[in-house]
Amino acid sequence: MKGIIFDLDGVLVDSMTAHYKAWKTAFEEITSLQVDERSIYLLEGMRGIDLVEEIFKKYNYTDLSKTQVAIRRKDELFRSVMNIRPYDKVNEILQELRCIKGIVSGSAKQDVISIMHQCFQKNIFEIVLTGDDIMHGKPDPEGFKLFLQRANLNPSEALVVENSPLGVEASNNAGIKPIVVLNNSPLSAKDFVHLIAHDRINQETKNIEDKLVMWCDDDK
């Protein structure tokens, strides 16, 4: 048996725009920082607290007492407009795959579960790990290693589908082969240089259906 680990936001569901807008507004309201889109996408995969700390470092913002305030405001904004949809063909692909399927996401458990209820068939994933289940977000490999433990798999028996450089780095750190889907991200193949081969970067999730099916069916 093999396993496929999916990131959620930006890989299976079209939610990254909503995340970015919520972060942008939260940072503006709480800290007056003007955070650009690429900065958020490049940090995607981190837990919220780590993302805020990285943004504060980048913009030389020193009032760390605003960290939790910014996170709470972002969560309020994101959840108030949460109307997330899966990318084209995602549900068909998930139903076709005959291997262990899991989600490893840096997002809060509440958000991950809510999105899953909106977008996917019940129990389509055997393993779901969120930012609440781990101590360290991506690029730390903790989430991926925990998936391997629960699935009783070796790194060579798993595949990671990611959309962020930090996610690919975490996959590499766990010794698991990654592939990338960009979907509607502002990032490009250049942002993944030295992390993954160019031919493993794909434009949309729907374009990797054959690759995933072959992975699950390949017993070699």
Image: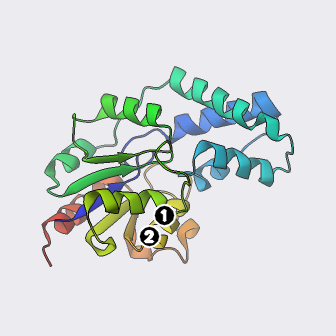
Front residue of this view, candidates 195 and 136: 136
Name the quadrant containing residue 147.
bottom left
The quarter of the picture where the N terminus appears is bottom left
Q: Is residue 202 visible?
A: no
Q: Is residue 34 left or right of residue 218?
A: right
Q: Could you say whether the residue bearing mark 1 is in a helix, strand or loop? A: loop
Q: Nearer the viewer, residue 15 or 116?
A: 116
Choose top left, top right, bottom left or bottom right for residue 72. top right
User: At which x and y percent is residue 133?
Assistant: 46, 45
Q: Label for residue 42?
A: none
Q: Which mark is residue 174?
A: 2
Q: Is residue 191 above or below residue 109?
A: below
Q: Residue at x 56, y 57 (%)?
A: 187
- Relative to 214, say whether 79 is above or below: above
In 3D space, how far apart are the residues under numbered discs 1 and 2 (Cα atoms)? Answer: 5 Å
Q: Residue at x 69, y 30 (%)?
A: 25
1 and 2 marks in contact (CB < 8 Å): yes
Secondary structure beneath label 2: loop
Residue topped by disc 1: 141
Report whether 49 appears left or right of 58: left
Residue 8 is situated, as x and y percent measured from the top left of the image, at 40, 46
What type is the residue that disc 2 sits on? Answer: Ala
Q: At x 55% / y 74%, what residue is drawn?
A: 193
